[in-house]
Image (tube, rainbow, N blue to C red):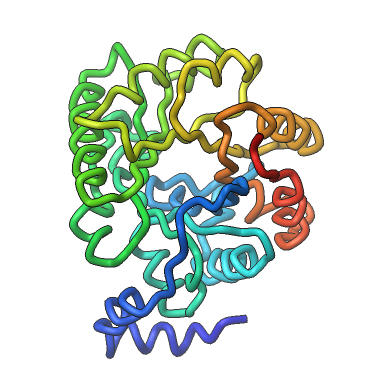
Amino acid sequence: MADYAELREIRARHPERIAQAAATRRRRPLYGGRQLMIVAADHPARGALGVAGRPLAMGSRVELLDRLTTALARPGVDGLLATPDIVEDLLLLGALHDKLVIGSMNRGGLQGAIFEFDDRFTAYDTETIVGMRLDGGKMLCRIAVDEPGTVATLQACARAVSDLAAHDRVAMVEPFWSARSGHDLSPEGVIKAINVSQALGSTSARTWLKIPVVEDMERVMQATTLPTLLLGGDPGDTPDLAYAAWRRALKLPGVRGLVVGRALLYPADDDVAGAVDTAVSMLSVPG
């Protein structure tokens, strides 16, 4: 277990060490040919703390950090997707050397809020991503035709895509065709979301997509030529079925890896290392 007393002391007395840790972090190439495994931990910033019926499963920061450091240390794990608070904790813990780090940008649409679809950019901005030597920025792009906040989200995402590309950073866009009742996870809904989101910004040269695994993924993946990472959601009570779907989708052209959060960090048996190793075993070198 990490020394969280020391971490707390650094945060209180030596906050400048965060920037120092970012400046000395050993970076790695974005993509070397093998499919990527990126661990996601940006749910808490939207108040989305639940996992498998446990509403506050992610509520303990020290437990989350324990699980993240375990996951990041496993062979084959390439990086982290998280908000500044978590990235900075892990920088101070020395857990991000030789890892990709993608900063989560728009976390303003809090889960269950009346303003949930106002996905404002309340976390990382491009300037900080560049200054902290991160490898890219991730944005949630929920498209709800009956929510007026959608157009502002689209505009903000487009600006972020352009700004990140101008600084040679990846713009990871996570699109959903959405409504208050939830995301449209039909193939048609995902295809529509892909087509809107991949046109955001003044260039798509640095844009990567992060999309859910749904039915008929062969047809879904025909909707884009952009590098695509699969969103590994909560497998619920049927992890074997979810993993089988991930394996099939990982074989499709254009799929460059997995981004998985709660499913690996909070597996039903609490074996984080085992869950991560299972996911890594599905990866391959795309043909």
Q: Is residue 266 or residue 210 the one in the foreground?
A: 210
Q: How many marks?
A: 0
> Residue 121 lies in what quarter of the image?
top left
Horizontal placement of 78 versus 157: left or right? right
Residue drawn at x 69%, y 34% as measured from the top left: 246
Q: Quadrant of the C terminus?
A: top right
Residue under the image location 81 percent in, 36 percent down:
240
Pick the quarter of the image with the N terminus.
Answer: bottom right
Please name whichever residue, 162 or 57, is drawn nearer the observer in this view of the structure: 162
Q: Is residue 203 visible?
A: yes
On screen, residue 27 above or below 103: below
| Spot occupied by residue 52 in the image (x, y as percentages of width and height) | 66, 42
Residue at (40, 83) in percent of width and height: 8
Q: Is residue 252 above or below residue 169?
A: above
Q: Position of residue 184 (x, y in %)?
A: 49, 16
Question: What residue lies at 52% left-to-right and 65% top-to-bottom?
Answer: 60
